[in-house]
Amino acid sequence: MPATLNKETLNFLSTLEINNNREWFNENKQLYLDAKANVESVVNEIISEVAEFDASVERLEAKNCIFRIYKDTRFSKDKTPYKTNLGASLVEKGPKTLNHAGYYIHFEPGKSFLAGGVYMTEPKNLKAIREAISSDGDEFLKILNKKSFKDILELQGTKLVKVPQGFDREDPMGDYLKFKQFTVFHPLSDADVLDKDFVKNTAKVLKEIYPFNRFLNEAIGR
């Protein structure tokens, strides 16, 4: 039987949002451990599916890819101690790295999604990506304009007002060069994540993301 996300996992996250304090969390620690174990089993199966078309993830283990639920509140006005989501990052260069393109799976009641690409990276990597887009614009657009990609994924990211310094202001790819992040996004409903075929459906979406990630990582020079 394929691993599936349990409704109890979403229920835990919903209840945590209402009771986001250490006393409640400590009293209900087992609910968290059960939810985390459930997500680990699902993510491990997703890794196996993705490894069929992207060998870079085959050595990853879900336990190393899932983000901590504990928040760092030192520089935040919101002092609630826990995240109200469970997320996992599948990246070849090491789980949770920010520098290379990978896949991201986010579980949160009413706000779940799949994503790929580079959210934050070093300036030299961002410059390398922009240079690749400028010089290989046709290849980049071929990926973005593929119907099966466009039907389920949307390019997102904050943008500069102007084409960045060092690039021709009239560059035909200028609008893409303004991006400061290169991420693609696929929203998920609660019904989607609870579907018995969630793992296989997720792998299909991530397979569409794969050429996008490969373009970015080749630009970075992995």
Image (cartoon, rainbow, N blue to C red):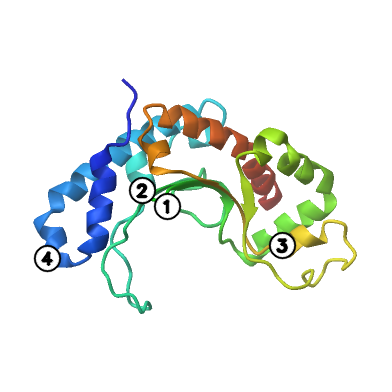
Return the disc, 3 or 2, that comes first in the chain's sequence. 2
Residue where numbered disc 4 is placed:
23
Q: Which mark, residue 121?
A: none
Q: Which quadrant would the N terminus be assigned to in this image?
A: top left
- Report the residue at 90% width, 65% height from top: 170
Say which residue label 3 marks. Answer: 127
Residue 81 position, x and y percent, is 26, 68
Residue annotated with mark 2: 66
Quadrant in the rendering for residue 55: top right
Q: Nearer the viewer, residue 175 or 213?
A: 175
Name the side, left or right, on which 217 lies relative to 40: right
> Which amino acid lies under the numbered mark 4 shown in the image of this protein?
Glu
Q: Mark 2: few, some, or many residues within 10 Å (few <14, many ≥20)?
A: many
Q: Is label 1 or label 4 in front? A: 1
Residue 131 x %, y % = 78, 57
Query: Mark 3, residues whose alpha carbon is within 10 Å: few (<14), some, or many (≥20)?
Result: some
Please give the name of the residue rendered at 48% of the width and 34% of the height, measured from the top-left corner.
202
Q: Nearer the viewer, mark 2 or mark 1?
A: 1
Count neighbours of disc 1 (C-alpha within 10 A) and say few if under 14, some if 14 to 19, many if 20 or more.
Answer: few
Mark 1 or mark 4: name the one nearer the start of the chain: 4
**Which of the 4 quarters of the picture holds residue 177?**
bottom right
Instruction: Give how far apart the Cα atoms at labels 2 and 4 are.
Output: 24 Å
